[in-house]
Image (cartoon, rainbow, N blue to C red):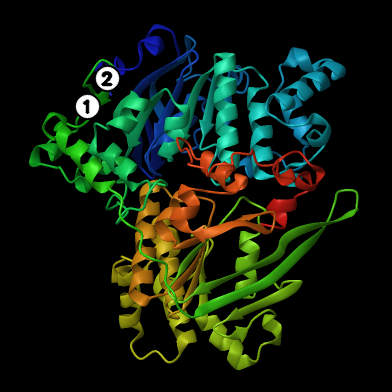
Amino acid sequence: MTDVGAASTSRRAAEDPVLSITALNIAARRGDRDRTLVRDVSFSIGAGQAVGIVGESGSGKTMTARSIIGLLPPNVHANGDVRFAGIQLSGASERALRTVRGSRIGLLMQDRFTMLNPLQTAGTHVVESLPRQVRRTRSQARAEMRRRLAEVGLDPDLVARRYPFQLSGGMRQRVALAAALAGDPELLIADEPTTALDVTTQDEVLQLLRRLQQQRGMALLLITHDLRVAFSVWDRVLVMYAGSLLEEAPADELMAAPEHPYTLGLLLAEPPVSHLVGSLNPIPGSVPAADDVANTCAFASRCDWQQPQCAASRPELTPVSDSRASACIRLTDIRGQLRQRRMEVELPVTPPPPPTGQPIAVISDLRRSHRTVRMLGRPETTVALNGVSFQIVEGESLGLVGETGSGKTTIARCLLGLDSPDSGTLRLAGIDVTNYRRLSRADRHSVRRLVQAVFQDPYSSLNPAFAVGTTLREALGVRGRVIDPDRQVGELLALVGLPASYSRLRPATLSGGERQRAAIARSLALQPRLLICDEPVASLDVSVQAQVLEVLRKVREQFAMSMLFITHDLSVVRQMTDRVIVLRNGDIVESGETPAVLDSPTHPYTIRLLESLPGHTTDARPGNETEPAEDPRETNSPAEIVGGPDRAGA
C-alpha cells in the first residue's frame, strides 16, 4: 500500500495515530533465499479506535501483528516503518521493545491454553503483568489484581488461586485479557481471541473487549477470520490476502457493500443463520504464496471477474471514496455486479420436509456422570447426561447444539462405543449398543460399519506417518476384500473433491480443509448408514468451512445417509439439519424442526444462544422473553472452576 492508500484511513487515525505502519514487508529465510510473507502493508490506528484485519489462514494477519512488537520467529525478518506513539519500533533492540511490550502494548493471543502458564495461578498471571511500582507492595498488588479480575467479570475469591486447567475456556480467556490489560496499554493486539469458544462465551468476550476498549479509550487491533466478529466489534476493517491489503473500509459500509471480489467471496461463504440457502458458496482454490502473486492481482486466479489486465501488474490499494480503498482495478466496471451477486446468492429456499421412516438410532433415557477429583482431593460428580431420549430416522440430519458441558460429545462417544452410559439404552439399526463390550464379534463388526465419525481437528484425525491413500486403503480393508484399491481410493477422493494424486501425499502437506476432506473420505470408506459429525468445521476458515459443508451435503444426498451433526454454530445448524435438539446441562430443553426452532424459539436458553450471534435478533414467541437462568458452569461456580464442562461433559 502506498502513501496514497495510507491516506484512506480514518481522519481520526491520521490526526492522532497510536500506531502507524508504512510499507511493511516480512520475509522468511529459506536456505539461501527469502520467502515473502507480507508485502507493502500500510495502515494506522487512532486512539480509541478499533481496527481489524480479516482474511483466510496464510494471508499474513498474525505475522503483521507479531512484527509490531518484535515477536517474529528467528528465521523471519521485517522491514518498513512501524511507529507507536511516536516511538520507532522497526529495527529497535529487544531491550527497547521490552519497555513497551506488555505495558504500553498488550497482547491477547488465540490459544488460551498456551497463553497461560499451567504452573501459575490466575492471580499470579495478573500480578506479574502489573506495573512495577504497583508490585512493590504486596497488599497493593493483591488489591489491584482483584480489581483487574473483577473488571473482566471474574470473582477474585473464586478465581485468583485457581490454575488454568481448573477454569473453563471462557474464564481462561478472561484471565488472559485481565493480564493483557494489567499494564494499562494504549494499544491492545488481539489475535483470534474467540476462536473455538462457544457462541455465548464468544459473545461475552467480544462485548467485554469492546466495552473495556471504549471505557479506556484504548486502540484495538483485532485479527480474525470470522466476519461476524469483525462487524460486531470493529470501526474499520482491513481485508488481507496473500500478504497484501485488498480492501479497507468502515465496518458497516463493508458489510453493506463490499468493493473487492475477495471480500464479497468471504461474505458469501458465511452460512446465514436467518434462512436456508440452496448452496453454500466457498471460494474455489486456496490462498497462494505472496511470492507467487508478486506481479499480479493476488486474487486473480480465484476471481470470477478476472481479465487479462488483472494479471498484467500488481494493483495498489487505492482510495475509491473518502472513507474506502480497494485494490481491484476493475471495480468501476463490476461494482453493480458485485451487488447483484450478493442479492442472488443469499436468496432463501424452502426447507424440504424432514425424512420420515424407520429409526436408524434410538436413544432412551441416557444418563452419564463423571467423577472428578478436586485439587484438595475431594471428589466431585458432574452430570453430563440427565435422561436424554431421541431418535434419528433413516436419511435424516439431526442437529445437536449447546455450549461446552451440555453433553453433546458424550452422546457421540456413547454411540461410537468410546464411552458407556450409567443407565439407559442405545440401539443402532435394531442392535443394542449400550455396552459395546457385551456385543458379539459379528454385531461389533456390523456396528463399526454402520456408524462412522468426522471429528473437529483435521490435524490429529489422520495418522501423520501414513499417506492419504494408505489410510483409505486401510479403511477399505475393514469393509472387506478390495479388488481394485487404487480405483476405489480415487473414487473416495473424487467424492470429497480431491484429485487422485492426493493419495500419495501425507497429511502434513495438506491444508486444513483438505485434511478434513480426507478424513471425510476415510469415514465414507465403510459406507456407513449414520455419520456423526462432531464440530467438523469449528477450526476452519469461513471459505474452507463452506467447502467442507458442501461436501457433507453432497455425500448425504448421494448416499441417503443419516447424520448426527454436533455443533455450537447455529448458522451451520440452519444449513445442515432437518431437526435440531438443544441441550443444556445434560437435559434437552427444546427440540423440533430446524426452521421452527431457529425462527421462533420457545426456551429462554435457545433465545440466548441465538441472540449471542453477532448481529442476530430472534423472533421469540410471546410469553417466553424471560431471561435464562445463569448456568453455573458458565459463571464462577466451584463446579465450573474445577473443570466440569471442559473436562467431563463436553
Provide the secondary structure element on which disc 1 rests: loop
Placement of the N terminus among the 4 image quadrants: top left
Which corner quadrant of the image does residue 213 belong to?
A: top right
Mark 2 residue type: Gly
The amino acid type found where label 1 is placed reads Glu
Q: How many marks?
A: 2
- Identity of the residue drawn at 60% across and 40% down: 201
Disc 2: which residue: 5
Crowd rating for badge 2 (residues with CA inside 10 Å; few <14, some 14–19, many 20+): many
- Of 480 and 627, the residue lying toward us: 627
> In this orientation, which residue lies closer to the viewer: 333 or 627?
627
Q: Which residue occupies 75% across, 46% down?
A: 640
Disc 2 and disc 1 in contact, CB within 8 angstroms: yes
Residue position for label 1: 316
Q: Could you say whether the residue bearing mark 2 is in a helix, strand or loop?
A: helix
Picture layout, residue 195 above or below residue 512: above
